[in-house]
Amino acid sequence: MGSSYGENIRLTLFGQSHSRAVGMVLEGVPAGKRIDLEELARFMARRAPGRNDYSTARRESDVPEFLGGLTDGVTCGAPIAAVIMNEDARPGDYKALSRTPRPGHADYTAYVKYFGHEDRSGGGHFSARLTAPLCVAGGICRQLLAAEGVGIISRIASIGAVRDEGELTVSTADKAFPTVSDARGKEMISAIAAAKADGDSLGGIVECAVVGVSAGLGDPVFGGMENRIAAILFGIPAVKGVEFGSGFAGSALRGSENNDGFYYDGTAVKTFTNNSGGILGGVTDGMPITFRAAFKPTPSIAKEQRTVDLNTMKDAVVSVPGRHDPCIVPRAVPCVEAAAAIAVYDALLGRKKEL
Amino acid sequence: MGSSYGENIRLTLFGQSHSRAVGMVLEGVPAGKRIDLEELARFMARRAPGRNDYSTARRESDVPEFLGGLTDGVTCGAPIAAVIMNEDARPGDYKALSRTPRPGHADYTAYVKYFGHEDRSGGGHFSARLTAPLCVAGGICRQLLAAEGVGIISRIASIGAVRDEGELTVSTADKAFPTVSDARGKEMISAIAAAKADGDSLGGIVECAVVGVSAGLGDPVFGGMENRIAAILFGIPAVKGVEFGSGFAGSALRGSENNDGFYYDGTAVKTFTNNSGGILGGVTDGMPITFRAAFKPTPSIAKEQRTVDLNTMKDAVVSVPGRHDPCIVPRAVPCVEAAAAIAVYDALLGRKKEL
Amino acid sequence: MGSSYGENIRLTLFGQSHSRAVGMVLEGVPAGKRIDLEELARFMARRAPGRNDYSTARRESDVPEFLGGLTDGVTCGAPIAAVIMNEDARPGDYKALSRTPRPGHADYTAYVKYFGHEDRSGGGHFSARLTAPLCVAGGICRQLLAAEGVGIISRIASIGAVRDEGELTVSTADKAFPTVSDARGKEMISAIAAAKADGDSLGGIVECAVVGVSAGLGDPVFGGMENRIAAILFGIPAVKGVEFGSGFAGSALRGSENNDGFYYDGTAVKTFTNNSGGILGGVTDGMPITFRAAFKPTPSIAKEQRTVDLNTMKDAVVSVPGRHDPCIVPRAVPCVEAAAAIAVYDALLGRKKEL
Amino acid sequence: MGSSYGENIRLTLFGQSHSRAVGMVLEGVPAGKRIDLEELARFMARRAPGRNDYSTARRESDVPEFLGGLTDGVTCGAPIAAVIMNEDARPGDYKALSRTPRPGHADYTAYVKYFGHEDRSGGGHFSARLTAPLCVAGGICRQLLAAEGVGIISRIASIGAVRDEGELTVSTADKAFPTVSDARGKEMISAIAAAKADGDSLGGIVECAVVGVSAGLGDPVFGGMENRIAAILFGIPAVKGVEFGSGFAGSALRGSENNDGFYYDGTAVKTFTNNSGGILGGVTDGMPITFRAAFKPTPSIAKEQRTVDLNTMKDAVVSVPGRHDPCIVPRAVPCVEAAAAIAVYDALLGRKKEL
């Protein structure tokens, strides 16, 4: 079972790309927390499709309808449940669709896993459409964290071969296209346009920092913050790698270079560097939690690709000319923040049990 | 709570570096499975310390004693419980130890999380010593997978700046120092020796492949194979990054380069390439599951490092002259395999529910 | 967190008595299972209110709308999600309501637990309204069990002081008012009418049998069938006791009387009696699972009761003149079956992992 | 999987009646809690066998050895792990044992569930021997609750047909044979002796109260205190019924009789009566949690009973002349308290997340 996440809160996602609705249930949020629905709408807007020419033309209003859990905008203790109707739901006769799985998509694996009974329309439950309710839950957790002094910022670290420069800061995260270097940002947008013109697609890397987290969150062994954050991040379609702090690059350093020395700044213990990404032994040390998530290039491309017709087992070709993001990365930024918010808020509630 | 893992089996680890014992409980393994204890001992020997000069001088016999779950070497359905006594257990008066947390270790975060009541000796429950019972569980799951035709192989992909060459194969995995290129392997060993001579340490990357897995394992969203494998891999101390298939490098490719086209080989659907690491939408496609885990350099180094005396909050220095691996990577290889075996066997049992 | 149940399937309920909707998400049902929505509607009708004069006058059509998980009435592997809109939802200004908790209800405990932020309308998430989505999930599991040869039957064993006679059989379970003795059934209906006339209410006992279950379901210790069934049954409002087989009465017998001797009937091992309720050591023995659930009298009564005004902490009285069942037991019968179906189907899937 | 319990703490039991040891792992207890090991030993002594002539002659010293989680008697945050060696462990050649399952025992169901690979010696993992590590965990939780002002008391409410009189109080719970009426207690002891003389056995009922619990513990629907307590109580072998407050008897009352009116005593809201057993809507109301657990008569009796030889499928008889309690109820009293302590402490930690 994969549609649930969490230990101290429990998030459950449901729905398919073209079913009646997608939605989420979020259990365990304490009562009495005010949720700012306008701020949530602004957060949701950051992942909404159809806003510019580097994302899919599909437009969904993506306004969550709350079915339970909130009274007058305040949590009442019951599970928070919200749905987003699929305005272009097409519960049609999927049997007429050809059985030529798209490379890089879950078409083939869903076919095997569900014995041919999978919802084949638009990727079914594997669709990136599920990140809409993920962002509802994440947007709520983000607000709950903000009330505890915890902020989440992120940037596009790379798209294709173009890498951003400089250090992630709050002002970067506020940009419409969040790169430190605007020049590099423009290059990224150009690269996306070029790939699109070629009927092709690009991937990239999102970098994220969770700031203001107190020391002591997370558990040893399998309950570490890395485990928790990775376990939810890989739930975002197209994520194929996750690293914390100095990550893969750090594995080439010596201990004397990678270790973060401690000092006391008069109010708190800090580290001179943050190669650990704010996590030691799985537990936060009070420095920002930093991580990077690698997204593969969007598998849906207009170019012809080789596949198999599952009805005949003959060679076939497939191209995906439809409404698809040539690069998912810009819209993935709030999804990464949502995932981080859920994981950190879950750990923060867990910490309360120990106090 | 972080000491448990699994959905269809449940592994619980316990013990500290210098407590009476470390151990594990593994629930959910079906009855009637023969466990070859000699093979398990050979697997355990691969991570045992003190075998050569690039690992710690601490020697532990590391023979698990089974307290329950096996009768005459066959699973009886009860939880499998095993302990490994800590021969050099030192349940001493830790209060006399100075409070100068070692950079890169969990000393400081454990102090905060446990309010100063943490077991300070040898890293307590955060110690890499816990990978011994992890390998007991993983060695068992590895045998259970082998009986289903699933094999797990791995290699050292890099140590420090030295990278292996070529492709991982079974013959590589069988080597005492598992690199494809023996020349590069020797360079790695030299690099470890050089770091050790400098009172310093190195990290590296372990690459692993799970072969023979049938298509259809894993669940969508948070239950994908990436989520499951990452969630356990980050439980191995020093792992700071995990990537599947083409991973971070794949994020710089175009979709037409990264997508794996399908073909039918007469008996099964396969892909020409395996950039997805055998996982699409979280579910196995029948190709090998491939992933890489980045290990940070061992934080324990003889060189002086800056820290804080937590009793006085004054600046301090600390060096760790004791028995420590200058590079954990060679001994981490079986730990990575153990983690992968547990995650994949858990998913394989989950698949049975659907059949 | 209390709104989820299950190990191999996971049921999550959401919504409140007067929120926009109540609903459920049911993860883990294998793909390719046909759900007969008309049969489900008939099952739902058994708990629907307003059908006769011993139940509440509130009428809800109680037709579940499926938002995901079914394509053309067949499970597609995605979580099954359904909502039932609350036609008389009243998301009003609850702050104007007086704070005089009703005895026997969750008003006071919800107030304490949720710090005064509870949804006070109609019992909020504690409302028996939540048994509607429970019956959606249970009705689905009941069909899935039926396809495996497992049936669930039940009867009203007592209402108030009136006890049914004879043995539960299939023909009893099919009755509109399911008692073996029609005479006793009429007495029960009269007793309800008398209590209602007095502005009072009655409780009772529901007896249930799960037939056709193969031996070997359930787990030892905390995973026994008793644990599993009790853990969900107490989720039905007003259940205050659960017993299996000879239960409380059996505790007064001698071992020689209560033990069920074994025999072989030519095809299967059976027991002469079934005082164990089909469960030994938590595991099914192939005989029917039998249990009884005690329901307290409906706490909502027209009679004046003593309470406290939580705003002033002064003595107060409260009476509940509204639309309420004078006896919940008749409508609780399908809820008990739903709970049993969910628990047994969950255990049946768990059994598959071991085969 | 049935050997684990808990949401905010997680208890895992392992071992079999005659395996090397039985034991437990208890995760999630906050660090810095002192455990009084002498008090724990006194608690354990209450369930120890061989103390008098109404219990089994098997003697085990039952001293837990702590392998991890405690340093100098104080919790260090790591999982608390303890084993009790089985001094008369007999890992013998069980294949020679005849296959005639004992009526009322798990012999037959274990045989089916584990495909004949079950540990047949002494009941294996189904043995009441597992209540020893349950009492280790429960004894610890009992101390942790005591530090929060929560006490647990219990009495023998009945044995066979003999019922105790009067109300449970602290002074009753302190007795060696805890009945309010000493006369009735003597009758119970006589009844046990009489059953034993007949080669037979008796069951009974244990009544328990958890006092000093604050209001607000527990969750709605499946997370109610009844669900939680029942889910662990049925893990004690021989428990076949559980009721809270007025329970089954309450189902025969009218609402006006069974409802507990509220009043304010100047410091807290209380109820005049406690028919709800301190739980409304699954959540504690601040009154004592009261419940009763029905134990079936010990299935092991010297009298001949009918069974089947599973090797030949022929009729057979079996008698169990060995060392067995003619009535498990007196020794079950601390087990019931242990179970209640674990469930309530788990809920109490859960409450902290909401504060």
Image: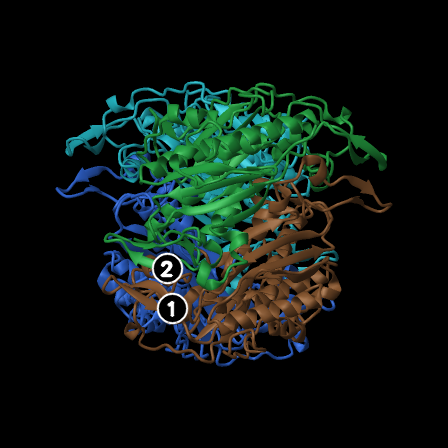
Chain colours: A brown, B green, C blue, D cyan
Q: What label does residue A332 carry, if any?
A: none
Residue tagged by mark 1?
A: A304
Residue type, mark 2 in image: Gly
Secondary structure category for the residue under label 1: loop
Q: Are dots 1 and 2 on a single chain?
A: no
Spatial separation of the CA atoms under disc 1 and disc 2: 10 Å
Give coordinates of residue C190: x percent, y percent: 36, 71
Residue type, mark 1 in image: Glu
The crowd level at tag 2 (other Cα within 10 Å; few <14, some 14-19, many 20+) is many
The answer for which chain carries disc 2 is: B
In the displayed structure, B180 sits above or below A303; it is above
The answer for which chain carries disc 1 is: A
Q: What label does residue B261 carry, if any?
A: 2
Give coordinates of residue C242: x percent, y percent: 41, 52
Give coordinates of residue B81: x percent, y percent: 45, 30
Secondary structure category for the residue under label 2: loop
Residue B42 in view, yes or no = yes
Compared across the picture, whether C138 is left or right of A166 comes to left
Residue at the location (34% across, 46% down)?
C353
- Tell me where residue D210 sits by quadrant: top right
In the displayed structure, D72 sits above or below C261; it is above
The crowd level at tag 1 (other Cα within 10 Å; few <14, some 14-19, many 20+) is some
Residue at the extreme left of the image, as rendered = C266
Q: Name the residue nearer the viewer: D294 or A313.
A: A313
Residue D331 in view, yes or no = no
Q: Name the residue nearer the viewer: C19 or B47.
A: B47
Residue at the location (49% across, 53% down)?
D246
Compared across the picture, whether A37 is left or right of B255 comes to right
In the displayed structure, C33 sits above or below C279; it is below
Give coordinates of residue B314: x percent, y percent: 86, 36
